[in-house]
Image (spheres, rainbow, N blue to C red):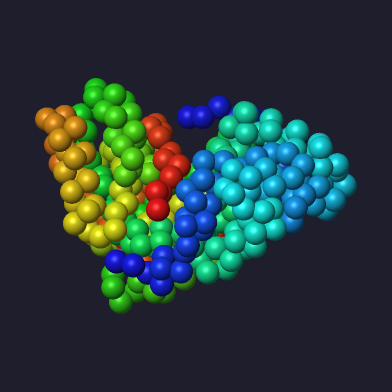
Amino acid sequence: MADVLEIDPIDRAIIAATQRGLPLVPRPYDAIGADLGLSGAVVQERMQAMVKSGVIRRIGVVPNHYKLGFSANGMTVWDVMDEYISDLGKKIGALDFVSHCYHRPRHVPHWPYNMFAMVHGKNREDVAAHANEIAKILGPAVKSSDIIYSKRILKKTGLRISV
Amino acid sequence: MNTAVEQSLDQHDKDIINALQGGFPICERPYLAAAKELNLTEDELIKRIESLLGNGALSRFGPLINAERMGGGLTLAALAVDEENFDRVAELVNAHEEIAHNYEREHGYNMWFVIATETPEQVAQTIKKIELETGLVVLNVPKLEEFFIGLRFDL
């Protein structure tokens, strides 16, 4: 579990104000500040500090991989022996075609898998080939696996933080 | 497969998408600073980001928050839904503002969604509400360990 940090109302207000995106004006931090009664310099300082503490993972663009031709996305799921998952997870997470990799709980018997690696590709053959590479790395530590392809986005709003 | 949006991108657009996945400056004129690296003017960069958001090439531009570090709750959850009830259940699930993403997937568990809440306790409350509304049991798989959050797609 990640450590929980104290977020004061000003940080919270800045986050809430930027959840729909950074203003597309030459001085975006001034614009955020103007809405909140803060100077642009204070907004910048606060945001720098939040990047440093990890409250903000990063500021940047989020590509829509479907629209960009990475239309196949396979959630690969693996039943990895518990004693090896931390070491192997790091190796899988470092692969460039894996966008997220997590250790999650099994719910036996319905759900035997404890590692999730999101794999992106131009098509399903691509994704399946990547899953094979993962299988090779996991070797005998993996008991079973599956690739769960996405069919359509039902909702995508991102996180909404209110003040 | 080339999508219409993908075909509409020129090299500047691709450079913007590749470069700005890694981060964006925090300074008085951040577009100006980022534009220099990309051989664009400040105004061109702003206009291009605007149009990439408009045509859907980008789904967001701004700070990405680690909700758990703010004291919020977050989990991945799934439902196994009959085909005939699928759309109705999707509506019920999506109606909760705590649902950040929801994907239809090809598996017995065919609906996968992220629940993001302001407090950790609200995750369990949201799951309970969804179970009551849908009559289905939610598979709850919160992360135990995070190995990496990849930053980039290379175009």
| Residue B45 location (% of width, % of height) | 63, 56
Give the side of residue B151 with respect to residue B25, left or right.
Answer: left
Give the side of residue A132 with respect to residue A65, left or right.
Answer: left
Give the side of residue A27 with respect to residue B85, left or right.
Answer: right
When the figure is inspected, residue B17 is found, relative to residue A66, above or below; the finding is above
Looking at the rendered image, the quarter that the N terminus of chain B falls into is bottom left
Q: Nearer the viewer, residue B32 or B107?
A: B32
Rendered image quadrant of residue B96: bottom right
In this figure, what is the number of numbered marks?
0
When the figure is inspected, residue A45 is found, relative to residue A34, above or below; the finding is above
Residue A58: tell me if it is visible.
yes
Residue A62: tell me if it is visible.
no
Furthest residue to the bottom?
B84
Q: Nearer the viewer, residue B23 or B8?
A: B8
Which residue shows up at 36% across the image and 37% down it? A102
Which residue shows up at 25% across the image and 60% down it? A123
| Residue A2 location (% of width, % of height) | 51, 29
Furthest residue to the left?
A140
Give the side of residue A141 with respect to residue B150, left or right.
Answer: left
Which residue shows up at 67% across the image and 54% down it? B41
| Residue B90 location (% of width, % of height) | 42, 68
Q: Nearer the viewer, residue B146 or A108?
A: B146
Rendered image quadrant of residue B136: bottom left
Q: Nearer the viewer, residue A44 or A106?
A: A44
When the figure is inspected, residue B75 is found, relative to residue A66, above or below; the finding is above
Rendered image quadrant of residue A12: top right
| Residue A5 location (% of width, % of height) | 63, 29
